[in-house]
């Protein structure tokens, strides 16, 4: 159990307050006392059984009409139970979200296990369901604050989403296949209403920045005749745009939405379950253990936590809020400055988005966009750059955090160590589901959807089963352990919905914008413009591409940012500059996520500032100092595509090793505290930085090796010149190299 600490973060942007426990979740499942609490839990468990019965058993014996009546009666019973067993508005909304999350997740599991309907049709139901759940999760504030305009917008959006998705689902064959390119007047009115609802919910979830992106995309489709140069097009009619966005079951319901429904959703459920079952507590204990071996162990907590959670989370900003809520207060408690703590967490959350096996859900999108490439191929190709990134960030975090930490051992933070038996059980609890994921994808090579289903189910089974086994071994109450794990599982389902909803909304909106842009032919226009501006020079083209990727990624989650740049920028690199597919896509993937760290938007840094209480611009500076190699690494993919070839041979391993040395040199030059005067200190910083870039990017390996030699010489010079007795230090180094020492 974690001991008490002075402060923890309530939410991004709010002041931290005292709490009983560092890892406490103020939004976790809380049941009423006594009889009412037992009835609430009973109703939730009954709902699980009811929906399992309806999804897997009833369809085999009853026609759809009778099943619909049974579902309606069940919904009436559950709504009545929510109203009767909850006394306040907040309680009723919390339990409504819980009850809504159960059929939602079970429907996702049902589709993953059966695939009895077309993916597009399921995607319609999926988007409608998650939009309604998002509205439920957002109703408390406007009701409590009597913000009737916001309340009207949310409720109207829920009604519109329900009606539109119900219509498209029940008439899927007619609208998506039989009458493609046509739409009735009522369908167009419905499309206008649904588009307005999506715009409102997008603004509600992500603010003005992304609202401008969506409106600009629609506006460009309508008024492209006024666009300059190569971007000019005749313009699309309003009717055609409505068909693209809604009626054709593309647009908002297109391939990205289907990808989320079939692949990404269950991984976000897995992330929610990890949090609910206490994975963060285990990560914290691992950080304490690591502090015995490295002074910056407490700061490395952010790197480890984000690596675990961020790789299965589709948004670096959401990841920063989730893991930062306990890593940032932990770092501040140890003496790390708020700006440094915020910078560390924002970079760690960004790095988590590129780590296998899920790569922030970007791997799924990449596998679907590159022809003839499987998900496993993408993961293997991403291993070397992920290793380079993690090592460089770990070193940078050590440089900036270790001098600030007052008590590297973190004594008193954690209570009694876990007994060996408990450690083994915890390892099984979290390790087996991850092993299931790796085995299914890497060995059996089954589909991603099947792997996600088995991983989530195994997490639930072990999340419930292991605590029961532990209680039995320790002669504790098995019933109490079972009830506690059921509560955790239900809370994990709720947490999964909260994490998934913004990701689903933003990707649906992105899909609508992308479909409009592709219809107008803008990817070809961007390709021609990029070639014209660069003059056909690759270096200029990739610098411009990097800038465009960062601009297009501003304010977006990882998957959304990558999707846009993959469809607009990557084809130019592939078709005009003949860069290999993997190198082009990894270039834009890494470049797009940099928007979360790049001022003046830097959404990831903004979230961590809200938790740490530090200044925004200082936190941005700290984040950029730590993440500097991340801005250079994409160029290494272009000039050394073997790094992301997915093949492990001399070419890929040597290129990866050189890129790692270069990244460490950049980190060393920017972050190491040199013991020199102003002029030599900045001279060394520039030298290490420039040599690092050369070693990472330069196309010829002989020049790279020369850069490595220069880095080594500079490092030796730093050691010798920075010591109290330079000549003695130099003699010691020479003696070590030659094998001769003074007697």
Image (tube, rainbow, N blue to C red):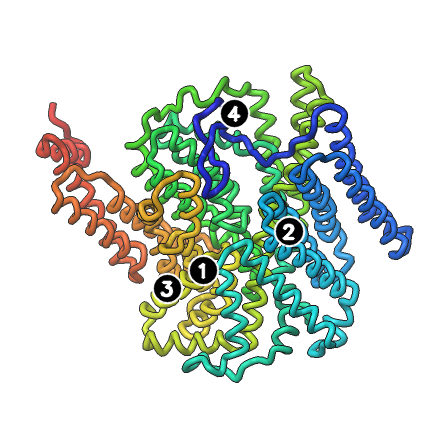
Alpha carbon of mark 4 to alpha carbon of mark 2: how far?
Answer: 30 Å
Q: Which residue is mark 2?
A: 135
Q: Which residue is mark 3?
A: 547
Q: Are marks 2 and 1 in contact (CB under 8 Å)?
A: no
Q: Residues within 10 Å of mark 2 (few under 14, many from 20)?
A: many
Instruction: Give the quadrant of residue 699.
Output: bottom left
Alpha carbon of mark 1 to alpha carbon of mark 4: how far?
Answer: 38 Å
| Viewer-side label of 2, 3 | 2
Mark 4 or mark 2, earlier in chain: 4
Q: Residues within 10 Å of mark 1 (few under 14, many from 20)?
A: many
Is 720 in front, or is 78?
78
Alpha carbon of mark 2 to alpha carbon of mark 3: how far?
Answer: 35 Å
Mark 1 or mark 4, earlier in chain: 4
x, y (%) of residue 667?
29, 46
- Residue 39 position (above or below residue 211): above
The answer to whether any part of residue 351 appears in the image is no
Alpha carbon of mark 3 to alpha carbon of mark 1: how far?
Answer: 10 Å
x, y (%) of residue 370?
54, 64
Is 269 in front, or is 193?
193
| Disc 1, SS | loop
Mark 2 or mark 3, earlier in chain: 2
Alpha carbon of mark 2 to alpha carbon of mark 1: how far?
Answer: 26 Å
Q: Which residue is mark 4?
A: 20
Which residue is at a point 59% across and 50% down the rendered structure image? 147
- Residue 70 position (above or below residue 232): above
Which residue is at a point 70% across and 50% down the rendered structure image? 108
């Amino acid at each position: 159990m974690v001991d008490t600490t002075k402060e923890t973060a309530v939410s991004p942007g709010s002041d931290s307050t005292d709490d009983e426990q560092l890892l406490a979740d103020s939004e976790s499942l809380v049941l009423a006392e006594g009889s009412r609490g037992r009835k609430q839990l009973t109703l939730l468990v009954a709902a699980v059984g009811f929906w399992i019965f309806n999804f897997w058993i009833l369809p085999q014996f009853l026609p759809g009409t009778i099943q619909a009546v049974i579902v309606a009666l069940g919904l009436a019973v559950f709504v009545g139970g929510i109203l009767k067993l909850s006394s306040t508005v907040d309680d009723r909304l919390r339990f409504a979200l819980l009850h809504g999350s159960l059929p939602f997740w079970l429907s996702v599991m049902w589709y993953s296990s059966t695939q009895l309907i077309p993916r597009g049709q399921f995607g319609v139901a999926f988007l409608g369901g998650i939009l309604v759940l998002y509205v439920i999760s957002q109703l408390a504030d406007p009701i409590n604050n009597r913000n009737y305009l916001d309340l009207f917008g949310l409720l109207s959006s829920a009604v519109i989403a329900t009606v539109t998705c119900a219509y498209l689902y029940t008439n899927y064959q007619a609208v998506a296949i039989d009458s493609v390119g046509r739409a009735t007047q009522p369908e167009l009115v419905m499309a206008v209403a649904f588009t307005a609802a999506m715009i409102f919910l997008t603004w509600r979830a992500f603010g003005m920045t992304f609202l401008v992106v969506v409106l600009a995309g629609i506006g460009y489709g309508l008024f492209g005749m006024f666009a300059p140069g190569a971007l000019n097009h005749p313009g699309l009619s309003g009717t055609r745009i409505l068909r693209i966005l809604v009626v054709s079951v593309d647009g908002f319901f297109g391939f990205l939405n289907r990808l989320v429904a079939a692949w990404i959703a269950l991984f976000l459920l897995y992330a929610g379950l990890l949090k609910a079952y206490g994975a963060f507590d285990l990560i914290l204990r691992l950080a304490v253990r690591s502090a015995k071996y490295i002074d910056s162990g407490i700061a490395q907590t952010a790197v480890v936590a984000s690596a675990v959670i961020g790789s299965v989370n589709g948004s670096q900003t959401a990841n920063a809020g989730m893991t930062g809520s306990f890593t940032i207060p932990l770092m501040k408690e140890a003496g790390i400055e708020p700006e440094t703590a915020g910078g560390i967490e924002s970079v760690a959350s960004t790095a988590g988005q590129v780590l296998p096996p899920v790569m922030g859900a970007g791997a799924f999108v990449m596998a679907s966009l590159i022809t003839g490439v499987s998900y496993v191929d993408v993961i293997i190709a991403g291993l070397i750059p992920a290793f380079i990134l993690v090592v460089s960030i770990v070193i940078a975090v050590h440089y900036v955090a270790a001098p600030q930490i007052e008590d590297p051992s973190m004594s008193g933070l954690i209570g009694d160590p876990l007994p060996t038996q408990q450690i083994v059980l915890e390892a099984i609890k979290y390790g087996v589901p991850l092993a299931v994921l790796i085995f299914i994808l890497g060995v059996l090579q089954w589909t991603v959807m099947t792997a996600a289903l088995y991983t989530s189910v195994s997490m639930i089974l072990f999340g419930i089963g292991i605590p029961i086994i532990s209680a039995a071994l320790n002669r504790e109450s098995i019933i109490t352990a079972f009830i506690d794990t059921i509560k955790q599982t239900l809370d994990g389902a709720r947490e999964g919905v909260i994490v998934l909803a913004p990701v689903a909304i933003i990707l649906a909106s992105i899909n609508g914008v992308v479909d409009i842009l592709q219809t107008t032919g803008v990817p070809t226009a961007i390709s021609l413009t990029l070639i014209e501006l660069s003059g056909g020079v690759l270096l200029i083209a990739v610098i411009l591409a990097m800038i465009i990727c960062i601009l297009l990624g501003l304010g977006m989650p990882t998957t959304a940012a990558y999707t846009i740049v993959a469809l607009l920028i990557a084809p130019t690199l592939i078709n005009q500059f003949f860069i290999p597919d993997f190198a082009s896509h990894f270039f834009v993937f890494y470049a797009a996520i940099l928007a979360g760290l790049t001022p003046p938007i830097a959404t990831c840094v903004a979230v961590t500032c809200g938790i740490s209480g530090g200044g925004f611009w200082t936190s941005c500076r700290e984040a950029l100092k730590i993440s500097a190699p991340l801005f250079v690494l994409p160029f290494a993919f272009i000039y050394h595509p073997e790094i992301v070839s997915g093949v492990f041979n001399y070419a890929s391993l040597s290129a990866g090793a050189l890129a790692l040395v270069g990244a460490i040199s950049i980190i060393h030059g920017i972050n190491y505290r040199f013991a020199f005067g102003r002029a030599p200190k900045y001279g060394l910083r520039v030298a290490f930085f420039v040599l690092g870039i050369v070693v990472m990017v330069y196309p010829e390996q002989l020049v790279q090796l020369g850069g490595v030699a220069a880095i080594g010489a500079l490092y030796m010079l730093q050691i010798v010149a920075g010591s109290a007795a330079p000549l003695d230090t130099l003699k010691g180094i020479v003696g070590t190299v030659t094998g001769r020492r003074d007697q």
